Image (spheres, rainbow, N blue to C red):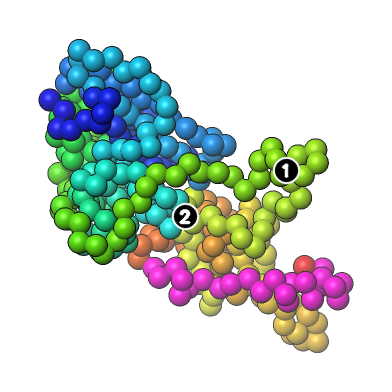
Amino acid sequence: MLPATNELGYYEIRLESIGGLGANVAGKILAEAGVVGSNFNALNFASYGSEKKGTPVKSYIRFAPKEKQIRINSPVVKPHLVAIFHENMVNTNPVTQGLYKDGIVILNTNKEVDQARDFLKLASGTVAVVDAIKIALELKTRINMVMLGAIVKMLGFINLDSVKELVKETFGKKYPQTIPSNIAGLEAGYNEVKFKYFEYDGKYPYVEYREERRPVGYSNAPIGGTIIEYGNTITKNNITSRVGKIPVFIKEKCINCGLCETTCPDYVFVWDRKVKNGKPRMFNMGLDYQYCKGCLRCVDICPAGALVEGIEREYDVEKITVKHDFDIYKKWYEEGENL
């Protein structure tokens, strides 16, 4: 039996994620488990945006009693449960908007429940936390499996064994070697999720749903639809693309060969010009993590071991980041330096 429904008789879920974390697959498995294992009607679909790794993805699931048909397929704007697959999305997207006042939010984080409530600025409802990144790295599984286990636990009306069978069916033909780790991740998410209910105390306001509108549309786009901004801009932010790992710079080992600069797709590295032996030379000062999506190509190519793989949560990224000085870059360019 569904614990609560809206005025149409549906229980609605919204998965907030980024491309590459598997929210779409998790939504499909969850909806099918509701039909096959729990005798509900269910509907699932996703919205992708540009459909690439690192860009926002939303997956929607609706459940209804078996005797009630689901006749709408519009996005879920007032969910009973929201699952946030990437912690950094909270700072860049209105992920909890429209949530019912007694709804459930599941956050992939290493924060404690009370810290997570303040981080989310949630007015009321149940906050659940699970460190899906840590579990996924330890068990060599995907974040979506851990999150799926936590979602099943918090819903309470989906049979876990049915989900396990569907995971086996989903990955059995193409990726049978992943089944044990995926099942382990599913069980870990189910068993390790922690949660707490918060009464409304006036600390944070309830966030109503608002339709997202892009700054450029048909009424104000440039003639011909030309986009005049450069591919990499000062305002670009890749932090939501990272899924747990970052390159860590060991300056003492750096030989300033520049291979990291040539392989990096996002101009992460910050360079300084210094005169040595009477000639100007470029020296690597570190990374501006605002632009880093954690692809680790620089780690693979570094010949000196000056770039190593690190778990992001073990570092204070704001402290180790080195910000680009775009004014000095402009000055060097105007002076005719070959950067």
Q: Position of residue 311 (x, y in %)?
A: 38, 60
Dot in front, 2 or 1: 1
In the image, 130 versus 271, the foreground residue is 130
Name the residue tied to disc 2: 92
**Labels 2 and 1 touching (C-beta < 8 A):** no
Q: Position of residue 175 (x, y in %)?
A: 37, 26
Q: Residue shown at 60%/57% (left/top)? A: 236
Residue 140 appears left or right of 302? left
Whether residue 164 is visible here, answered yes or no, is no
Q: Residue shown at 40%/23% (left/top)? A: 73
Q: Residue shown at 29%/50% (left/top)? A: 107
Q: Callout 2: 10 Å neighbours few (<14), some, many (20+)?
A: few
Magenta part of the chain: 315-338
Residue 129 appears left or right of 75? left
In the image, 101 versus 272, the foreground residue is 101
Q: Residue shown at 59%/45% (left/top)? A: 214
- Farthest front residue? 7
Regarding mark 2 in the picture, which secondary structure is present there?
A: helix
Name the residue tied to disc 1: 221
For residue 147, which quarter of the picture? Answer: top left
Q: CA distance from mark 2 to mark 1?
A: 23 Å
* Residue 333 among those drawn in magenta: yes
Task: Tell me the kind of residue under disc 1.
Answer: Ala
Task: Tell me the kind of residue under disc 2.
Answer: Thr
